[in-house]
Image: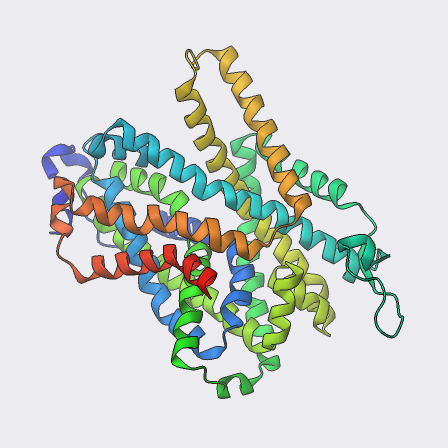
Amino acid sequence: MQNEAISVQEVPESIVVSATGWTRQDTTWMLSLFGTAVGAGILFLPINAGMGGFWPLVLMAIIIGPMTYLAHRGLSRFVCSSAIPGSDITQVVEEHFGVGAGKAITWLYFLAIYPIVLIYGVGITNTVDSFIIHQLGMFTEVPRLLIDGAPALTEAGVQIVDKISGIPRWLLSGALILSMMSVMVAGEKFMLSVTRLLVYPLVAILAFMSLYLIPDWKMDALMVVPSTTEFLGTVWLTIPVLVFAFNHSPAISQFSVSLKKDHGANASRKADVILRNTAIMLVGFVMLFVFSCVLSLTPAQLMEAKADNLPILSYLANVHESGFVSYFAPVIAFVAIISSFFGHYMGATEGLKGIVSKQLAGSDKPETSKKLDKFILGFMFITIWAVAIMNPSILGMIEALGGPVIAAILYLMPMYAIYKVPALKAYRGRVSNIFVVITGLLSMTAILFGLLS
C-alpha cells in the first residue's frame, strides 16, 4: 500500500476512512489549490514561454503536468509522514531532521514567498499605470532624456518622448500596495471572503478570454522550427517560470494537515487523487490560455511586452482592436494579482514572524507580539513599495529568485526525505522520483544557463 508511511495504529480507527469516492470537500480543496496557482504567474508565463516559438511550448505543455503533480504529491506525502497530529511542514522538518533544519526550511519558505510578494507590488503598479495611460488616456509626454539619460533627439532631430501616467509612480504604487495590505490588516476572515469573491469570476473570465482569442490565432508560428540547441535552451530557460506559474505549495502544508485529520492513514492516498485532478485542471486551463495568447501575438510583440514589464493581458489590451479585450484584460490582470497577493503576503508575514520571534526572548508576550506585528507591517510595506518604485524586471525576478528557491523546497527536499526518512521508505526506488529531481535541478540551474548564454 502507498500509505505504509503512516501505520493505521497511529490514528483512531474511527477516522481511518476510505480514500475512494469523490466528495464535495475534495472539490473545494481542488479549487482552492487551483486558485493558489492561478495568479500573476500565468500572466507572465505566455511572454517567456512564447518568445521561443510554438514547438518548445508543446514540450513544456507535455512535461509540466507530471512535474506539477509529482512534485506537489511528494511535498504532501512528506507532511503526511509525521507521527505528530497537526504538524505543519516546518514541524515535520524538525521532527525528521532536527531543529536546525527546521529553521533553515523556515528561511527557505520565506525566501521563496517574499520575492513573489515583491513581484506583485511591481505587477499591480504596472498594470494600473498601463490602464491609466492606454485605456483612460491620462498621460504626460516626457522627453526620454529626462527618464533614462538617453539622447533626447533622433538623427532626424525629432524629440523622443515617453508617455507616462499623470500619477507619480511613487504615489500610485504606495496607494495600491496600501490598499491591498489594508485588506490583510482587516483580518483573515475578511481576506478569505474577498479572495473567494475574486477567484471564481477570475477563472471563468480567463477561460472565456482564451476562447475569445482563438479567431486571432496566427498559424504561421507552426512553420518556425528552431534548432535542437535553441529548442532545448528555450525549454530550460522557461522551466523556472513554469515552476512559478504552476506552484501551489503554499497551500500544501495546510491541505495535508487537514486531510490527515479527516482521513488518517488514508490521507496520502486521498491527497494523491486531489492533487492529480488539480494538476489536470491546471494544465488544461493554463496551457490553453498560454497557447491562445502566444498564437495571437508575434514573437516581436511578446518581446515588447517583456521590455514593457507588463502582464500579457495588459499588453493585449494595448494592442488588440477589440473594446472587450482593451477594457476587460487589465481588469482580469488586476484581479489575478490581488487574489494571489493575499495568500502569498500572509505566508511571507507568517514566515518572517516565525523567524524573528525565535530570536526574541519573551516574544510570546502580548506587548512584544504587537510590536513585532507593527514592525513586520512596516517592513513589508516599505520594501514592497521601494521595489515597486524601482520597477525591476518581473520575469527576471521570477527566473532568479522565485523559480529556483521554490524548486529547492518543492522538488528536491521531499525527494531527499524519501531516501532519509524511514516513514517514507515505501516511496523509494521509483522512476518518478528521478524525474522530479532532474526537473528540480534544471529549474535551479536555468539561471546559470541564462548567464552563460
Q: Is residue 220 left or right of residue 127?
A: left
> Which residue is at a point 37% across and 57% down the rendered structure image?
445
Total marks in image: 0
Q: Position of residue 405 (x, y in %)?
A: 40, 47
Residue 79, image quadrant: top left
> Which residue is at a point 70% across and 38% down the rendered structure image?
174
Q: Is residue 8 left or right of residue 356?
A: left
The answer to which of 326 and 273 lies nearer the viewer is 326
Q: Is residue 79 left or right of residue 58?
A: left
**Image position of 99 with respect to 280: above or below:** above
Q: Position of residue 187 (x, y in %)?
A: 55, 30
> Which residue is at a point 44% across and 73% down the rendered structure image?
57
> Which residue is at a point 25% across and 55% down the rendered structure image?
21
The answer to which of 127 and 399 lies nearer the viewer is 399
Q: Position of residue 431 (x, y in %)?
A: 18, 62
Q: Position of residue 133 (x, y in %)?
A: 79, 58
Q: Is residue 22 visible?
A: no
Q: Is residue 350 visible?
A: yes
